[in-house]
């Protein structure tokens, strides 16, 4: 009978977590591609309709705006995971490696607190506006605003991944 050590279990858990975060990021990138593609198609449709066909399609402007907002909030988590947000890039270039890890940890923790606040108030905002509908598309604004807590939850997940990896590196 083969015994499994504590370290093997931890390694397996770490691999599973990495696989989860990698697949989540890949799914979000595909979703971002769909959002941005929809944004481009909607905008081109409006340009063609307005300047070539001389008609205006009222819902295209509203849909493009909502797709842009959704893409920004979904992209927030993906960019944070890759450390591609502007403040993180600034730190990476200016700080020595030993201070950089501590600064990134502090940044992750502060961003996590901020994200928790935004999730709470974003959820309240979404519920508050659930009864209202958008002017052109007649869709519930609660659905439109739902991206705020959803996007910040994604951000929070990736921030937790970063914090856990910091402590995992310190342990080993």
Image (spheres, rainbow, N blue to C red):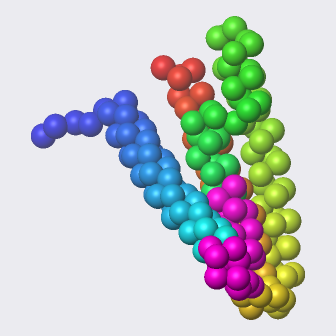
The image quadrant of residue 112 is top right
The image quadrant of residue 120 is bottom right
- Where is residue 127 drawn, in percent x and y? 81, 80
Q: Residue furthest left?
A: 1
Over which residues does the magenta segment extend?
48-72
User: 17 above or below 7?
Assistant: below
Tell me what residue is drawn at x 82 percent, y 88 percent.
135
Is 5 on the left-hand or right-hand side of 96? Answer: left
Tell me what residue is drawn at x 44 percent, y 46 percent.
22
Check if residue 170 falls in the magenta segment.
no
Residue in front for this viewpoint, 105 or 66: 66
- Where is residue 47 drawn, in percent x and y? 67, 70
Is 31 on the left-hand or right-hand side of 134? Answer: left
Is 7 on the left-hand or right-hand side of 72? Answer: left
Asked whether the viewer can see residue 49, the reply is yes
Tell me what residue is drawn at x 64 percent, y 76 percent.
52
- Where is residue 86 drawn, in percent x and y? 74, 32
Asked whether the viewer can see residue 163, the reply is no
- Where is residue 153 drawn, in percent x and y? 67, 57
Q: Magenta stretch mostly in which secondary structure?
A: helix
Check if residue 53 falls in the magenta segment.
yes
Quadrant (top left, top right, bottom left, bottom right) of the N terminus: top left
């Amino acid at each position: 009978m083969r015994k499994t050590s504590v370290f093997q279990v931890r390694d397996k858990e770490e691999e599973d977590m990495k696989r989860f975060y990698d697949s989540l990021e890949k799914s979000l990138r595909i979703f971002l591609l769909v959002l941005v593609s929809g944004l481009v198609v909607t905008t081109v449709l409006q340009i063609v309709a307005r300047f070539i066909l001389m008609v205006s399609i009222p819902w295209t402007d509203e849909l493009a705006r909502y797709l842009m907002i959704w893409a920004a909030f979904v992209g927030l988590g993906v960019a944070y995971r890759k450390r591609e947000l502007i403040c993180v890039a600034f730190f990476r270039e200016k700080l020595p490696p030993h201070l950089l890890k501590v600064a990134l940890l502090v940044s992750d923790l502060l961003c996590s607190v901020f994200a928790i606040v935004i999730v709470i108030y974003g959820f309240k905002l979404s519920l508050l506006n659930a009864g209202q509908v958008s002017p052109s598309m007649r869709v519930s604004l609660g659905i439109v605003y739902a991206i705020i807590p959803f996007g910040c939850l994604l951000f929070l997940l990736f921030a937790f991944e970063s914090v856990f990896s910091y402590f995992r590196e310190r342990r080993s």
